[in-house]
Image (cartoon, grey):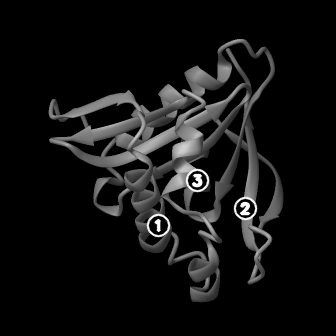
């Protein structure tokens, strides 16, 4: 997706609602083939736009947008890509790769070991195509009840 209208930029205060919306639409649209309706319904837990505003304050979130519309984002901590979500309409056109590259670059900054990620089942193949390998299966839960969400713990060696 080398659309010149799509820009990557640092997230800024006020983007929290857009990140919440992208995450929700991504989970519901892209995860429905791998997760139950019960898992999808409880995925966001008690998250709100403020949850994402708090993440933005760390200064490690990058947004992809076109003409003011947020299409996706990536967030990282040292050694880990913590979140990568795209709107379903933006998936499969190279934007995920661009965001992943930016997230890996941020995660690698000041870190010498492998880069880790907790992948959803539907995204595992994407991450494998971009150099990650599965380490083990796991479960994710927000602690608010509901069915746990199966994930795949993955890592990529730094070159």
Viewer-side residue, 122 vs 50: 50
Q: Judge the density around disc 2: few (<14), some (14-19), many (≥20) Cα neighbours within 10 Å.
A: some
The CA span between labels 3 and 1 is 13 Å
Q: Secondary structure at mark 2?
A: strand
Q: Secondary structure at mark 3?
A: helix
* Location of the C terminus (image quadrant): top right
Q: Residue at x 65, y 71 (%)?
A: 45
Would residue 115 be visible to someone looking at this image? Answer: yes
Q: Quadrant of residue 37?
A: bottom right
Q: Residue at x 48, y 59 (%)?
A: 23
Q: Judge the density around disc 1: few (<14), some (14-19), many (≥20) Cα neighbours within 10 Å.
A: some
Q: Judge the density around disc 3: few (<14), some (14-19), many (≥20) Cα neighbours within 10 Å.
A: some
The CA span between labels 2 and 3 is 21 Å
The image shows residue 81 at horizontal and vertical percentages of 64, 37
Mark 3 and mark 1 lie on one chain; the one further toward the N terminus is 1
Q: For mark 1, what is the residue?
A: 24
**What's the mark number on residue 51?**
3
Tell us which disc is closer to us: 2 or 3.
3
Q: For mark 2, what is the residue?
A: 151
Mark 2 and mark 1 lie on one chain; the one further toward the N terminus is 1
Mark 2 and mark 3 lie on one chain; the one further toward the N terminus is 3
**Residue 22 position (above or below residue 35):** above
Q: Secondary structure at mark 1?
A: helix
């Amino acid at each position: 997706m080398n659309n010149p209208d799509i820009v990557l930029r640092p997230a800024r205060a006020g983007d929290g609602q857009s990140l919440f919306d992208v995450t929700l639409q991504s989970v519901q649209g892209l995860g429905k083939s791998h997760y139950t309706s019960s898992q999808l319904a409880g995925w966001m837990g008690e998250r709100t736009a403020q949850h994402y505003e708090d993440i933005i304050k760390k200064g490690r979130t990058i947004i992809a947008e076109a003409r003011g519309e947020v299409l996706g984002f990536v967030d990282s901590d040292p050694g880990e890509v913590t979140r990568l979500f795209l709107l379903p309409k933006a998936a499969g056109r190279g934007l995920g790769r661009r965001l992943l590259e930016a997230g890996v670059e941020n995660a690698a900054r000041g870190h010498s070991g492998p880069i880790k990620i907790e992948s959803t089942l539907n995204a595992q193949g994407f991450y494998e195509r971009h150099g990650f390998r599965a380490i083990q299966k796991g479960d994710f839960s927000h602690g608010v009840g509901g069915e746990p969400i199966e994930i795949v713990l993955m890592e990529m060696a730094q070159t």
